[in-house]
Image: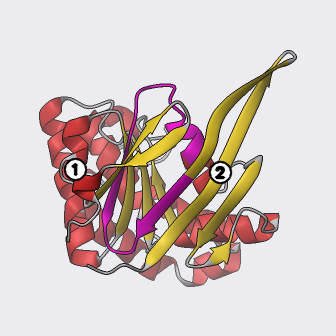
């Protein structure tokens, strides 16, 4: 097992305020995601899973604690560095897909490059970018739907397009927040199988947030969140 740590959180704390009342959400979270492995984070709704994901994705700041990506601190980085970390190193997929409704599948997949590059750079590289987008759609089994908009696709097809979009920039880590939560059981299994293929074939590191124990059963390592704290599952700590 490759024990290199790609993402690490140390004693993360986060609270929100309702009127004058402070509501603790994370109470000192320690977490490690090892390169090339699938890590599951399991917990009930409201346990703090999504708050933790937002911190790990540099979408929000912790009140206290540290976050490191490949040993580099992210929690106190500049906005420019945090944006670069998110755009270059991470892929993110959500339960509700978040595809742009006015764009076709291939245009949604191309969107990260359109956003991250200047107009001139994208224009110069547009043919190569389109070929890569078509390759990604083919890998997720959606090339035949390249010109279809989200309203013309099923939930499973929209999640496949979201996966292709998330992996378009070749990130080293994928954050998946309830990726099967809006899908039926059979379609959910297909999406998990697809993610496992990217993990096995490309060495993609995956942190999967879920409330479903059956999803965690296939992970290499597992954390369980309860009342804003994490506990490791000993049975999942040393699986190769």
Sequence-first disc among 1 and 2: 2
Q: Nearer the viewer, mark 1 or mark 2?
A: 2
The quarter of the image holding the C terminus is bottom left
Element under disc 2: strand
Residue at position x 17%, y 38% in the image = 187
Q: Is residue 99 visible?
A: no
Which residue is outermost to the right? 20
Percent position of residue 48, x then y: 54, 35
What residue sits right under mark 2 in the picture?
Answer: 12
Residue in the foreground of this view, choosing between 170 and 102: 170
* Residue farthest to the top, as pictured: 19
Q: Quadrant of the N terminus?
A: bottom left
Q: Is residue 73 above or below residue 229?
A: below
Which element type, helix, strand or loop, lies under badge 1?
Answer: helix
Magenta-tinted stretch = 30-52
Label 1 vs label 2: CA separation? 28 Å
Q: Which mark is residue 125?
A: none
Picture residue at 36% right of the left edge, 78% below the top: 3
Q: Quadrant of residue 211?
A: top left
Q: Is residue 39 magenta?
A: yes
Q: Is residue 85 left or right of residue 191?
A: right
| Number of other residues with Cα within 10 Å of mark 1, as a class: few under 14, some 14 to 19, many 20 or more | some
Q: Position of residue 84 (x, y in %)?
A: 67, 71
Residue 59 image point, x, y percent: 67, 50
Q: What colouring does the structure picture have?
A: secondary structure
Question: Is 139 colored magenta in this rendering?
Answer: no
Q: Are marks 1 and 2 in contact (CB under 8 Å)?
A: no
- As displayed, is residue 186 above or below residue 32? above
Number of labels in the image equals 2
Residue found at x 26% / y 31%: 183
Is residue 164 shown to the viewer in this render?
yes
**Numbered tag placed on residue 192 in the rendering:** 1
């Amino acid at each position: 097992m490759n024990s290199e740590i790609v993402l690490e959180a140390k004693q993360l704390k986060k609270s929100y305020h309702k009127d004058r009342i402070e509501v603790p959400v994370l109470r000192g979270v320690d977490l490690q995601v090892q390169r090339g492995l699938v890590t599951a984070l399991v917990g009930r709704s409201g346990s703090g899973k999504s708050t933790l994901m937002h911190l790990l994705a540099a979408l929000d700041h912790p009140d206290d604690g540290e976050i490191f990506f490949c040993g580099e601190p992210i929690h106190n980085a500049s906005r420019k560095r945090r944006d670069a970390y998110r755009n270059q190193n991470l892929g993110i997929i959500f339960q509700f897909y978040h595809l742009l409704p006015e764009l076709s599948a291939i245009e949604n997949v191309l969107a990260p490059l359109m956003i991250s590059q200047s107009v001139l750079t994208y224009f110069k590289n547009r043919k190569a970018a389109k070929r890569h987008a078509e390759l990604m759609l083919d890998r997720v089994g959606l090339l035949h739907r390249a010109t279809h908009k989200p309203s013309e696709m099923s939930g499973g097809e929209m999640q496949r397009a979201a996966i292709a979009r998330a992996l378009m920039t070749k990130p080293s880590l994928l954050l998946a927040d309830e990726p099967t939560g809006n899908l039926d059981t059979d379609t959910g299994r297909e999406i998990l199988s697809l993610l496992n293929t990217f993990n096995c074939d490309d060495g993609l590191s995956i942190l999967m947030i879920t409330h479903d124990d059956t999803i965690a059963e296939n992970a290499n390592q597992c954390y369980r969140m309860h009342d804003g704290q994490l506990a490791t599952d000993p049975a999942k700590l040393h699986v190769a």
